[in-house]
Image: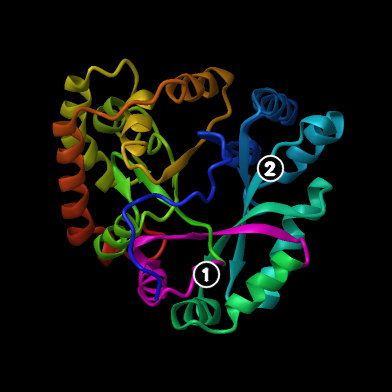
């Protein structure tokens, strides 16, 4: 078993600090041409993209944008899974073929069923992941974590199985959400495992989530916004994206934050927030960390899958 380390590893150090999430590119309520234009705007910034064949017709939008400017095709994360190596290979093809590329920079492993069991127990999935890498289909792997899936990566990390195969871990990490169980979070911190923080602003400005009925897609987010808004107000941050980015990057092993938008001005706000990153005031950061430990024990680890 590898020794523990509090120093962040060198994995995933080539990521852009902000990664453009493409969920909104799959929203058919937005005119197709507008979505293609948004893809071009994001491509011109040089940031990495995060996408999935599950995001409506986002891959069709990306293909249209990429075919118009192949020199600017970004480096990308793709969601792949689920319960068997056969399904995993299928989802790899479902993601790369529609956009006209032959490999993925990073595969985000969404593990369930047999694959999750093998991951936890050091099973054959690790040889399968190595084979995919050796074949050139997937260059690197990160493991997706939710509160209801934290057990398998916790067991795997405790035994040291992912070393040399898995390059990092990806989950919702923002002031209102920390979607790794407390025990897994502590181990990730102890070992300095690379983290990619998803859902940068947790669905919108904290005041809107707190004050506007229906703005928070679940009641728990509105309740958390009530607790976090006073911290934001006294933080000195000029924008909610700045506050969220500073929170995430206060953890030294966070490599990037993934945020989605269909509006160029919001993309600019994200990019402005990552230009100069400094930690939040220590008292505010500590208060959020304490809240998240409480939220995890009280709510997150008891939640039904996909209910949060």
Res. 201 mark: none
Q: Image check: 136 left or right of 246?
A: right
Location of residue 140 with respect to 263 vertically, above or below: below
Position of the C terminus by quadrant: bottom left
| Secondary structure under the numbered disc 1 in the rendered image | strand
Q: Image check: 65 left or right of 307?
A: right
Report crowding for label 2: few under 14, some 14 to 19, many 20 or more residues within 10 A (C-alpha): many
Q: Position of residue 94 (x, y in %)?
A: 75, 59
| Secondary structure under the numbered disc 2 in the rendered image | helix
Position of the N terminus by quadrant: bottom left
Q: Give the range drawn in magenta.
A: 135-164
Q: Where is residue 171 in the image (x, y as percent from the top left)?
A: 43, 52
Report crowding for label 1: few under 14, some 14 to 19, many 20 or more residues within 10 A (C-alpha): many
Q: Position of residue 4 (x, y in %)?
A: 33, 64
Q: Image check: 219 left or right of 129?
A: left
Residue 84 visible, this angle: no
| Residues at marks 1 and 2 touching, judged by CB atoms closer than 8 Å | no
Location of residue 56 with respect to 242 vertically, above or below: below
Location of residue 253 with respect to 94 vertically, above or below: above
**Would you name the residue on which mark 1 appears?**
111
Q: Does the magenta stretch include residue 162?
A: yes
**Would you name the residue on which mark 2 appears?**
58
Between 172 and 254, the residue placed more toward the observer is 254
Residue 305 visible, this angle: yes
Image-quadrant location for residue 26: top right
Q: Residue visible at 52% across and 69% down?
A: 111
Q: Residue visible at 59% across and 83% down?
A: 124
Q: Does the magenta stretch include residue 234?
A: no
Q: Residue visible at 63% across and 46% down?
A: 51
Q: Position of residue 44 (x, y in %)?
A: 70, 23
Image-quadrant location for residue 129: bottom right
């Amino acid at each position: 078993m590898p020794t523990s380390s509090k120093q962040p590893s060198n994995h995933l150090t080539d990521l852009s600090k902000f990664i453009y999430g493409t969920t909104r590119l799959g929203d058919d309520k937005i005119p197709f041409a507008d979505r293609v234009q948004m893809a071009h705007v994001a491509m011109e910034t040089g940031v990495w993209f995060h996408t999935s064949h599950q995001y409506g017709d986002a891959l069709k939008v990306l293909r249209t944008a990429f075919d118009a400017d192949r020199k600017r095709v970004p480096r990308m994360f793709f969601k792949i899974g689920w319960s068997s190596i056969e399904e995993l290979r299928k989802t790899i093809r479902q993601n790369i073929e529609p956009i006209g590329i032959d490999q993925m920079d990073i595969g985000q492993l969404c593990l369930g069923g047999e694959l999750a069991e093998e991951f936890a127990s050091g099973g054959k999935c690790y040889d399968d992941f190595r084979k995919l890498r050796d074949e050139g289909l997937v260059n690197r792997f990160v493991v997706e974590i939710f509160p209801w899936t934290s057990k398998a990566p916790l067991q795997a990390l405790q035994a040291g199985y992912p070393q040399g195969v898995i390059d990092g871990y990806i989950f919702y990490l923002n002031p209102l959400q920390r979607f790794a169980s407390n025990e897994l979070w502590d181990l990730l911190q102890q070992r300095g495992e690379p983290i990619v923080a998803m859902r940068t602003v947790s669905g919108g400005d904290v005041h809107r989530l707190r004050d506007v009925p229906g703005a928070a897609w679940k009641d728990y987010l509105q309740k958390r916004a009530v607790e976090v808004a006073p911290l934001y107000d006294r933080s000195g941050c000029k924008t909610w994206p700045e506050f969220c980015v500073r929170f995430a990057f206060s953890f030294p092993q966070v490599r990037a934050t993934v945020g989605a938008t269909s509006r160029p001005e919001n993309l600019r706000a994200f990019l402005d927030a990552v230009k100069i990153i400094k930690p939040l005031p220590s008292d505010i950061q500590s208060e959020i960390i304490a809240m998240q430990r409480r939220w995890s024990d009280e709510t997150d680890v008891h939640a039904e899958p996909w209910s949060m």
